[in-house]
Image (cartoon, rainbow, N blue to C red):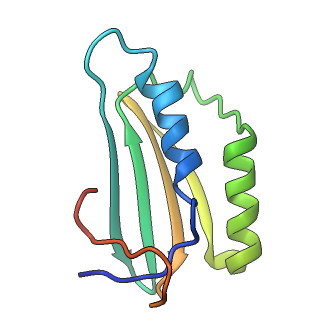
Amino acid sequence: MLETSVPQLLLQPLVENAIKHGVAPHAGPARVCIKAERAGESVEIRVVDDGPGLPAGIIREGLGLTNTRKRLEQLYGPAGQLTLHSLPRGLEVAVRVPRRSGRSAQISASTV
């Protein structure tokens, strides 16, 4: 099991965005996956949807992404990162935090 401390409600705005912008526009079934894996001395947590993705390289950060990015920077400095990756079908938002054990939420390396 991969254990690390993750700030409370860190993933909530990312999952909400995936549902609002990736899943809700679908007429049929849609998918949101949350994955976590070790990345050196960090843990990378990815929220991936199979929605329409971003229009040709246009990335607009709303309040949720901006606040999450600022929160990571404040908590971890350059070790906390948030990146967006446009996929052929959908969008991936990746959060990187330093590996630490603690009382916060525990994450396993399997898909949640």
Compared with residue 39, is residue 91 higher up or lower down, i.e. above or below? above
- In this view of the protein, which residue sits in the foreground, 84 or 7? 7
Which picture quadrant has residue 110? bottom left
Give x and y (percent) for residue 105.
Answer: 45, 74
Question: Could you tell me which quadrant the N terminus lies in?
Answer: bottom left
Compared with residue 56, is residue 13 higher up or lower down, i.e. above or below? below
For the question of whether residue 37 can be seen, the reply is: yes
x 48%, y 36%: residue:
18
x 35%, y 83%: residue:
3
Give x and y (percent) for residue 65.
Answer: 67, 47
- Left or right, 27 with respect to 82, comes to left
- In this view of the protein, which residue sits in the foreground, 18 or 61? 18
Give x and y (percent) for residue 80.
Answer: 62, 72
Which picture quadrant has residue 23? top left
Give x and y (percent) for residue 52.
Answer: 44, 21
x 65%, y 34%: residue:
59
For the question of whether residue 84 can be seen, the reply is: no
